[in-house]
Amino acid sequence: MSRIELIGVKGPSLSSEHWPIVRRCRAIVVSNRHKCLVTGLLLPLIDITPVAAMLTRVQEALEDGDVAVLASGDPLFFGIGRTLIEHFGADRLRVHPALSAVQLACARFRTTWDDIALLSLHGRSPQDVVGRILHHPRMMLFTDRLNSPNRIAASLLTTLKAHDDQARIEAITIRVAENLGLSEERLTRGSLAEIADQQFSPLNMMLIEQRRWNRSSPRFGLDEEEIRHSRGLITKSEVRAATLHRLRLPENGVLWDIGGGSGSVSLEAARLCPELSIYTVEKKAEEQSNIRANIRRFGTYTMHLVCGEAPEALADLPDPDRIFVGGSGKRLPAILETAVARLAEGGRIVVNAVLEQSEATTLHCLQQLGLKVASSTLAVSRRTFTDGESRMFNPITLITGDK
């Protein structure tokens, strides 16, 4: 059976070990950058992109013999290896890896990499790049032409300035390694502002580090006193826990928090699911200020404050997988109609109703809109045994609708 020889390339030439392998192949898959490595060989060259066309041509070439695929570094590490294995099966491949770009970059930076989070932006548009970066004390990025180091640094700077997070701005250091292993290799170190003001080769690795990292607070279960809010207007801890349980949050996707108040539900959701994109809609300036302060304190930059009133403020948001309605003013029917229309198939909406009228309206609307509806009512009482104080809170009904 003919095979695919998957060869990791390091530096400006093939190694003496790789030349005999390439010469006995019937075709070679290369990127434009690697074509110069095989000049003079009278073998068909297959462009590595577009990938679908490449896979078809490799399948045809395998009928005549082995096919070589040249890829940078370790092709099994954020490389073409995954695609080849999924398409042809692992038994069809022989892999000859070089050092990965992460290993090489960290060697140049003289830093360890066993504790670094990794994110590839090659040909991808992951949501909340800024939020995902800021969730980790150290992150290495595989950048591309669109997601270049200067643009990423500028986005980080813009987001942090919008939340008046000067401490975090000053705590971030960026290192960029360009053209690793080539004669044009260059290493750059700087602040967010310094990196945002430069241009970089498309072939680079970007390491973002935050000093004074502090994640001592729990992942879930923040007390009301830890969350900035106004005049006691916050979803009580017990109700917040039940609400998050009812939401059945996905690992990633989009959550709308309508009538965010202090942002307490969004805040806990962001800490539980750091790859979830959260849009917190709030119309009151005082609460908007509280939400910004909470984002800044806990570093939950996958939360996006939407200043405005629903349903109009929902128009430009990405379609949600989950929706929480904690406040609606007198616009509940319009909010529910708009929200449910945008909710993804298989998605869920949760509405917390304190008033009987809100409960009745929600139950009627969600059933009319074709959702599978259920509800439960919570009555919270608290007692502290140091001073014997006890408190009762108004019952609240949690209504869920599944689409």
Image (cartoon, helix red, strand yellow):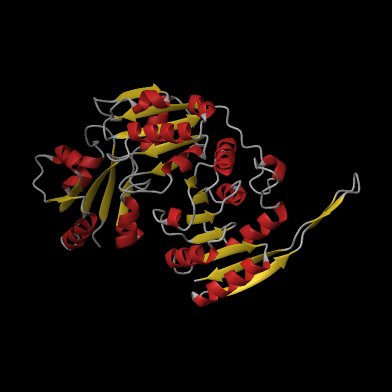
- Estimate the x, y position of residue 239 in percent, counting from the top left: 69, 57
Q: Hey, which quadrant is residue 194 in on the image?
A: top left
Q: Hey, which quadrant is residue 31 in on the image?
A: top left
- Estimate the x, y position of residue 138 in percent, counting from the top left: 49, 34
At horizontal 59% and vertical 68% (from top left) the residue drawn is 400
Q: Nearer the viewer, residue 263 or 189?
A: 263
- Estimate the x, y position of residue 43 in percent, counting from the top left: 11, 49
Q: Is residue 113 above or below residue 7?
A: above
Q: Is residue 401 above or below residue 99?
A: below
Which quarter of the rendered picture does the N terminus lie within?
A: bottom left
Q: Does residue 154 appear anywhere in the picture?
A: yes
Q: Hey, which quadrant is residue 338 in on the image?
A: bottom left
At horizontal 30% and vertical 29% (from top left) the residue drawn is 178
- Estimate the x, y position of residue 341 in percent, counting from the top left: 43, 67
Relative placement, left or right, of 140 versus 382 is: left
Q: Is residue 153 above or below residue 356?
A: above
At horizontal 52% and vertical 60% (from top left) the residue drawn is 323
Q: Nearer the viewer, residue 200 or 15?
A: 200
Q: Nearer the viewer, residue 43 or 342?
A: 342
Relative placement, left or right, of 388 versus 285 is: right
Q: Is residue 6 above or below residue 162?
A: below
